[in-house]
Amino acid sequence: MKLIVLDRDGVINRDSDAYIKSPDEWEPLPGSLEAIARLNEAGYTVTVATNQSGIARGLFDIATLAAIHQKMHRLLARHGGHIDAVFFCPHGPDDGCDCRKPDAGLFTQIARRYDADLTGVPAVGDSLRDIEAALLVDAQPMLVRTGKGERTLAAGMLPASLPVFDDLAQVAATLTAESPA
């Protein structure tokens, strides 16, 4: 099985420091939905691992998160793509859970669900915490410049060998060129 793990905010959709709190606020980044469809076409099982601390902060509830994800799935289907599963952490930064990135809990949930070894699995994110979580399970982290990506690059705390891409479309083009269906 070819598996890929994507962060949501800043990778698939526009990010906001004020959080994405409703379906109306969820807007796909240019080319991201087409990129996921391209990954699907190439045989990838596409998963999402996303911190959603807005739930713990009382900014939105699980039903609203489900509505946001329904919009994402609906718009993606129009492009011929799908996300196989969304894994999310509803906890705040001080809750002490193991699922909030930079911890690896979401990745271990994905590994269990798919009975998969995540070694070398592409894991696309826009923040240091995405990269750190991927490294904990020996996945292959990839940074995109969208979302918080430029800010993350500017901080200069990333591994020197980390692949950096302009956006998810460039990641998909690279992976599908290397790995035909």
Image (cartoon, rainbow, N blue to C red):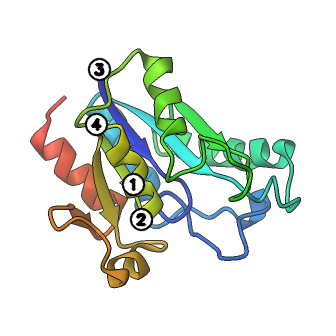
Q: Earlier in the sequence, mark 2 or mark 3?
A: 3
**Residue 10 in the image, given as x and y percentages of width and height:** 51, 65
Residue at the left extreme of this rendering: 178
Whole-Å distance between the Cαs marked 1 and 3? 24 Å
x then y, percent, for residue 50? 58, 49
Residue at image mark 1: 132
Residue at the (46%, 36%) spot, across then down: 107
Work out which quarter of the rendered image holds the C terminus and state it: top left
Image-based side of 91 in relation to 110, left or right: right
Q: CA distance from mark 2 to mark 4?
A: 17 Å
Between the C-alphas of marks 3 and 4, the distance is 10 Å
Residue 121 bears which disc, if any?
Answer: 4
Along the polypeptide, which appears first: circle 2 or circle 4?
Answer: 4
Q: Which residue is mark 2?
A: 128
Q: Choose mark 1 or mark 3, whichever is in front.
A: 1
Q: CA distance from mark 2 to mark 1?
A: 6 Å
Q: Could you tell me which secondary element the residue under label 4 belongs to?
A: loop
Q: Residue shown at 40%/75% (left/top)? A: 152
Tell me which amino acid carries mark 1: Glu
How far apart are the alpha carbons under marks 1 and 4? 14 Å
Q: Nearer the viewer, residue 140 or 60?
A: 140
Q: Which quarter of the figure has residue 167?
A: bottom left
Q: Are marks 1 and 4 in contact (CB under 8 Å)?
A: no
Q: Provide the residue designation for mark 3.
A: 1
| 161, above or below 120, in the image | below
Which is more toward the observer, 163 or 80?
163
